[in-house]
Image (cartoon, rainbow, N blue to C red):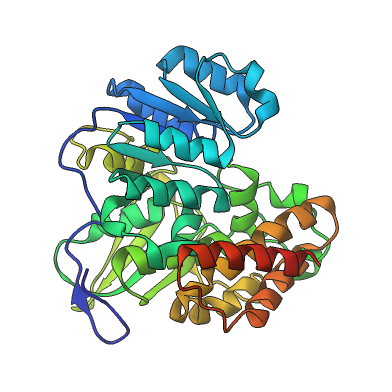
């Protein structure tokens, strides 16, 4: 893809990848999460076969999905849950997921796994020549330098919105929006004593614990900037807060005009496009322009979101994404246990970035080693 950097505008005329025809079947990784459930709604609507389901520990919901979609294979997180799964072919753990991918034949893999656990399945799917509909942010955050994005379509409202707005015109800057998370309207002093339960009370939607905490810290938005860097080959990307989550992305064009993508808070639209390439019938109801009310954009304040201090440094050094992610995945459970405060989570991540700032993994194997080293450092 052509590069777009500051003061060097260019034309971006295509999605990171598209598919030219309807897939014959899909493999769905992360079937019991929000993205997975919505993917199955789309699959059922269009009679799209589901060859395999991969879930974590929500075995009850997985069994419901097995009964409804009759997958050929399934995988779960823990061996001790195997006997509870109503299926004759069950794989377990990360190695089980990789084996399931090798034994599958579906041309499309939907990766909706959460966190670092989704990276190796993304790499494996691409190695096998599959098209990856990617909802797992961490794959590109951690290993974007080693991932061929021509085989990836993001399932992400922000990146979908960016692509949707591109029509071959010269682009100056890409802008994605953030909700602001659970504490966007709290006093800074009160945030110092905020609890894990407080951070899960997102004002706009209900998602899994990790992404909701990442929304409160703005880490998810930093990750999305890194995703945009790899998907659109640009570091000229930024984020602003739009509290209603109606506008997902904006593009500033060279001619001085700006366009915005409006859509409801519903992931079925980007999922449908990721699976089918084009959609020519209603997926969501139209945006009620008169019902929206006033819209307001706000800057992301590093005092409220300390992770934002390193935004420019991370975009300039995207290989540091593995450091940020590993430290963040240690910090969140520490906050949940009450070992650290809300702001101390950011301190842990910022300290890790300073400590490992000169580390630049030269391979996926080195990424795995660095990830392990960072986690040990942060834990200790």
Say which of 288 and 271 sits in front.
Answer: 271
The N terminus appears in which quarter of the rendering? bottom left
Please provide percent x and percent y for residue 268.
37, 37
Q: Residue at (41%, 44%) from the top-left corner?
A: 291
- The image quadrant that residue 109 belongs to is top left
Say which of 116 and 251 sits in front.
Answer: 116
Is residue 294 found left or right of 301 in the rendered image?
left
Q: Is residue 44 visible?
A: yes
Q: Residue at (39%, 39%) from the top-left corner?
A: 110
Q: Residue at (53%, 65%) from the top-left corner?
A: 367
Q: Is residue 170 above or below residue 368?
A: below
Is residue 194 found left or right of 154 in the rendered image?
right
Q: Is residue 75 above or below residue 237?
A: above
Please provide percent x and percent y for residue 189.
80, 69
Q: Is residue 156 visible?
A: no
Say which of 94 and 167 sits in front.
Answer: 94
Please provide percent x and percent y for residue 258.
27, 69
Which residue in the rendered view is the most extreme toward the bottom?
Answer: 7
The C terminus appears in which quarter of the rendering? bottom right
Please provide percent x and percent y for residue 96.
53, 35
Q: Is residue 246 above or below residue 368?
A: above
């Amino acid at each position: 893809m052509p590069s777009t950097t500051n003061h060097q505008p260019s034309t971006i005329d295509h999605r990171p990848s598209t598919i030219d025809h309807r897939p014959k079947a899909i493999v769905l990784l992360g079937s019991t999460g929000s993205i997975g459930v919505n993917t199955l709604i789309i699959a059922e609507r269009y009679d799209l076969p589901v060859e395999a389901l991969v879930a974590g520990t929500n075995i009850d919901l997985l069994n419901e999905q097995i009964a409804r979609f009759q997958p050929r294979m399934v995988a779960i997180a823990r061996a001790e849950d195997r006997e509870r799964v109503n299926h004759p072919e069950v794989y377990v753990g990360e190695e089980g997921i990789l084996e399931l991918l090798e034994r599958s034949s579906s041309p499309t893999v939907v990766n909706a796994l959460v966190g670092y656990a989704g990276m190796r399945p993304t790499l494996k799917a691409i190695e096998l020549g599959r098209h990856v509909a990617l909802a797992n942010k961490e794959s590109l955050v951690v290993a974007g330098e080693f991932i061929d994005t021509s085989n990836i379509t993001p399932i992400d409202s922000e990146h979908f919105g960016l692509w949707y707005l591109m029509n071959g015109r010269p682009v100056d800057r890409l802008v994605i929006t953030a909700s602001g998370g659970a504490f966007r309207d709290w006093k800074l002093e009160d945030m110092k004593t905020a609890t894990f339960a407080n951070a899960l009370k997102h004002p706009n939607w209900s998602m899994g614990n990790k992404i909701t905490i990442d929304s409160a810290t703005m880490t998810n938005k930093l990750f999305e900037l890194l995703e945009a860097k790899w998907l659109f080959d640009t570091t000229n990307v930024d984020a602003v807060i739009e509290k209603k989550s109606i506008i997902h992305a904006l593009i500033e064009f060279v001619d001085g005009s700006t366009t915005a993508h409006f859509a409801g808070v519903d992931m079925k639209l980007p999922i449908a496009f990721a699976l089918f390439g084009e959609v020519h019938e209603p997926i969501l109801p139209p945006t009620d322009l008169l019902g929206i009310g006033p819209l307001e954009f706000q800057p992301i304040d590093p005092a409220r979101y300390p992770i934002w201090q390193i935004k420019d440094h991370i975009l300039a050094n995207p290989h540091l994404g593995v450091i940020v992610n590993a430290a963040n995945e240690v910090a969140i459970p520490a906050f949940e246990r009450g070992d650290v405060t809300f702001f101390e989570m950011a301190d842990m991540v910022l300290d890790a970035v300073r400590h490992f700032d000169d580390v630049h993994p030269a391979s996926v194997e080195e990424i795995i080693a660095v990830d392990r080293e960072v986690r040990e450092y942060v834990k200790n």
